[in-house]
Image: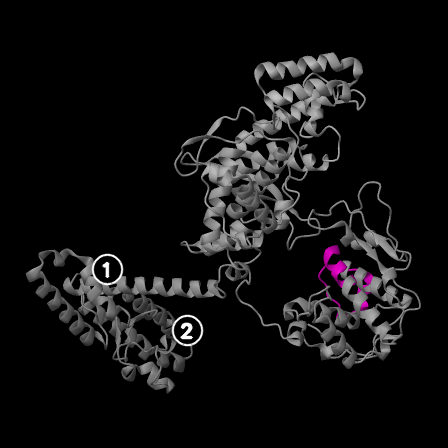
Amino acid sequence: MMPRSIAVPAPRRARSAFAGADVCDIAGLRLAAGARRVIFDQDRWRMELADAHRQISPYELDWDFAEILNPAWRVVTKEILLGLLAPQHEAMVQCPYAPRTVRSPRTCYRYLVYLTLWFNYLTSCGIHCLSEVTQEMCARHLEEQFWSAPSLGLPRWRLEPESVTIVVRTVQVVALYAELLSTDTYQAGFVPWNGRPAAAVVGAKPRGENAVPPVPDQLLQPLLATCLYLAEVVGLRLAEVVEARRTHEAARVMGPVARIADVPRLQALCEEFRERAEPLPKVAANQIARNADRPDHSLRPLAWGHLVSLVGFRKIADTAKPHLAPALLEVAEDVGFAGAWAREAPSIPRYGDDEPVPWTAPLTADDLRTAVGNMMTACAVVTSALSGMRSSELLELEVGCRNPARTVTGGGRRFRLSGKVIKNKRFGGAPDEWVVVEQVDRAIALAERLVGRPRGTALFGNVDLTVRVRTLRAWLERTGLRAHWGLPVIPGGPCGSRMLRRTLALSIAQRPGGLLAAKVALKHISVATTEGYTARPGGSQRLFHAEVEAADEKEHLELTVQAFRDAQAGIMPAGPGARGLIDAFAHIDAELKDAARTDPKILSDDRHLENLLRKLAKTLHVGPANFCWFRDPSKALCLRLAGTPDAKRPLVGMCDSARCPQATHHPCHRPVWAGQAQTIDVFITSRRIAKGEKQRLVPERDRALRVVAEIDAATPVPAERS
């Protein structure tokens, strides 16, 4: 918690506690092999870290303190950031208010950005010493940061309060490290905004429920249907073509360059195209447009590289092209041009009606790359939507992350992915395993085939799913493939990985026991986090109490039914409230007999009996040695003794069931009372108990024996006596 004021700090250090130190060594960050050390005194820290996760951008590990105009405040910023990275350093002992939680380099970079804004703002105001800072300056800086950055042709708008809490924390953090700073600090005792929490300063309201909206059904259903179809039907055909092209290109790079002497061989190849009536290989439409200024207009669509590779050449020399052009022009007039790949596309079942259709028209190399990119989008959407992975966890999936499927009891199979959990873990993340459905396993297998990368490299290079889905939607419509494959129209709208994760959380939590299942599936650190995701803040406590109340109600009903069955068998209740309970049972028994005249099944139907006894069971409160039938609060002895006659529940701990007119004793209570009498007898016969105390215990024993006798008298069946 931010202090309201800070005691007068000790005199500032003459030299920084970190001067000359290795930053990464102090912070416990591992440098990559061959990386240069980062020294505290440098004005630029370029950290090449071995454990950097894939979500962190290179610029977030390149800290340029020279952007801070005041040199003294550069040192202040370095000391604060290193204090955030290494809160357990011995120099931090003197900072009682500094946070003790290790911050990641990514978080510290955000502090660097906003400290730079704050300090340069002070410089622009003519402030050269932090002791001159006032609350008014802090408020003016915050108001400035509340507005968006200027943009050409657009008015500035006011930001949401949650987005500027970092501004308040950054201004306040200088006060927390006053004892550590060596070059400058605030005046003694000054804490911006009097130490109020950042959220309270900016007016941010706490949200019990996660603010990320789920993906609407009208978008989710066609999107998932499309992506599953692409990943499980179209993708397999595409992967075959991609692997064939990969093999072709690997052989092509080993070939020589076709020169003038090789033209006859290439002319023979052209004749083969004519004989087979096969179109010449074509380049993508954008490449045709780029070649518009070339003199050989008729050959602009020709994919020269692919053509010559068919006879083992890597490429054709420009000097050889004019010698081959006449033959190519003649062939082109007869056969035309078409994409070089997937020319004999096998059929696949259309979505919805299973009508066989060719999976694609011939593809150029660029068309193939575009198709692969969109197929990777489909795989990423399926993985995100059906596993609930965060974007950081999707980025950590690597080629080879699929573990062998395990057969489980009952004949099913369990599919697992190895990856990392980044959030709330040490820097770089912690290895973890995801249990996924088979569709996700197949999507990952397809993605591995499509990228063709070595094992251990990143599988998904970009997981901005909203942008990628927009591109996928446009590709399906532009190429006509959506209609060709019979796929549903994907409406517009955002559908990022956070929204898909939230949608899955809501779906799981709506099932019995789903809250805990969602916590496990989404790898949350606490159920409270899951409650926020599932729109049920406070849900675990509410569910717990609801389950307890349901269990109590069930048990009380079973006890009431058992007491009624005992009364039917002649085993009557005892105690002051026995008469009232027997009358209630007699009334219910009469109702059962009346119902039996019209429906003989009623006599053997426990459900009908439970319905008749349910109201009575709701008044039952179980004590340690009695049942309390709390039907009339005015008659409750415990409430009269406590002076709370209007209470809604009895005070079971104050119950004197031997005198309360609503208490009953049953055979199950006999061992308790008999045991009490035996225990008191032990004390009465003991020589170590004072005579006066023995006299006080005699009435207690007599009362216990009287209750035992009443229970025995109400039970006609002989029982073993204590």
- Whether 213 is drawn above or below 132: the answer is above
- Whether 249 is drawn above or below 625: the answer is above
Q: Magenta segment range? A: 87-112
Task: Say what amino acid the circle numbered 2 marks.
Answer: Arg
Is disc 1 placed on a helix, strand or loop? loop
Q: Quadrant of residue 685?
A: bottom left
- Marks 1 and 2, the one that precedes in the sequence: 2
Please name which of the two marks, 1 or 2, marks the residue nearer to the observer: 1
Q: Is residue 458 left or right of residue 129?
A: left
- Whether 226 is drawn above or below 67: the answer is above
Of residues 325 and 660, the one nearer the viewer is: 325
Name the spot of residue 712 as percent of width and height, x first.
20, 67
Give the crowd class for mark 1: few <14, some 14-19, many >=20 residues within 10 Å.
few
Q: Residue at image x 75%, y 55%?
A: 105
Q: Is residue 701 left or right of residue 431?
A: left
Task: Say what amino acid the circle numbered 1 marks.
Answer: Glu
Q: How many marks?
A: 2
Q: From the image, tell me which residue sits under label 1.
A: 720
Is disc 2 placed on a helix, strand or loop? loop
Single out the residue that lies furthest toward the right.
14
Q: Residue at image x 48%, y 50%?
A: 220
Single out the residue that lies furthest toward the bottom.
643
Name the spot of residue 372 as percent of width and height, x first.
60, 36
Asked if residue 431 shows in the view, the reply is no
Asked if residue 75 shows in the view, the reply is yes
Q: Quadrant of residue 650?
A: bottom left
Q: From the image, tell me which residue sits under label 2.
A: 687
Asked if residue 493 is among those painted magenta in the image, a careful observer would answer no
